[in-house]
Image (tube, rainbow, N blue to C red):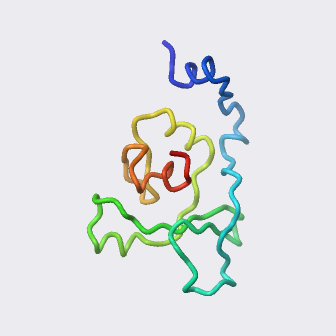
Amino acid sequence: MTTAIDIAKTIFGYEPIDTQEDYDAQPDLPTTWSTSDKAGSLKPGDITRDKRSGRLRLYWEPVGDNYTSDEKEDLSGFYEIPCMGELEEWSFDSLALTPAEDSVEPDHPDSWLRLLGMI
């Protein structure tokens, strides 16, 4: 059976992730906000690096209609950016996750793929 990854490899020369280290790595993204910045300067989509883990985190405020206004307020905050392996899987699947780990279509405004500009 031919998978979407096989097709992308054949047609576009795509090279799938093939090591655990590459799977676990986060995308190489610049940080756009630091804890030393003014709190009022924080906006959705800002990226910071967690001082303890060194992992990248994205500030998210839900915009999709699948959350109530109370849920949107409760869910707003920093979320660890997924690893490359998860992003690759969602890119070839019919579902992706939001930072709140809800399943949505990959092009949904709260999908990690949309939030990271991959779609």
Q: Residue at x 39, y 65 (%)?
A: 62
31 left or right of 103 in image: right
Q: Residue at x 72, y 34 (%)?
A: 19
Q: Nearer the viewer, residue 75 or 109?
A: 109
Q: Is residue 109 above or below residue 7?
A: below
Residue 14: x and y in percent read: 65, 27
Q: Quadrant of residue 20?
A: top right
Residue 34: x and y in percent read: 67, 77
73 left or right of 44 in image: left
Q: Is residue 35 above or below residue 6?
A: below
Residue 119: x and y in percent read: 50, 45
Q: Is residue 10 above or below residue 113?
A: above
3 left or right of 13 in image: left
Residue 66: x and y in percent read: 28, 58
Q: Nearer the viewer, residue 23 or 37?
A: 37
Q: Residue at x 67, y 33 (%)?
A: 17
Q: Residue at x 50, y 48 (%)?
A: 113
Q: Is residue 2 above or below residue 25?
A: above
119 left or right of 13 in image: left
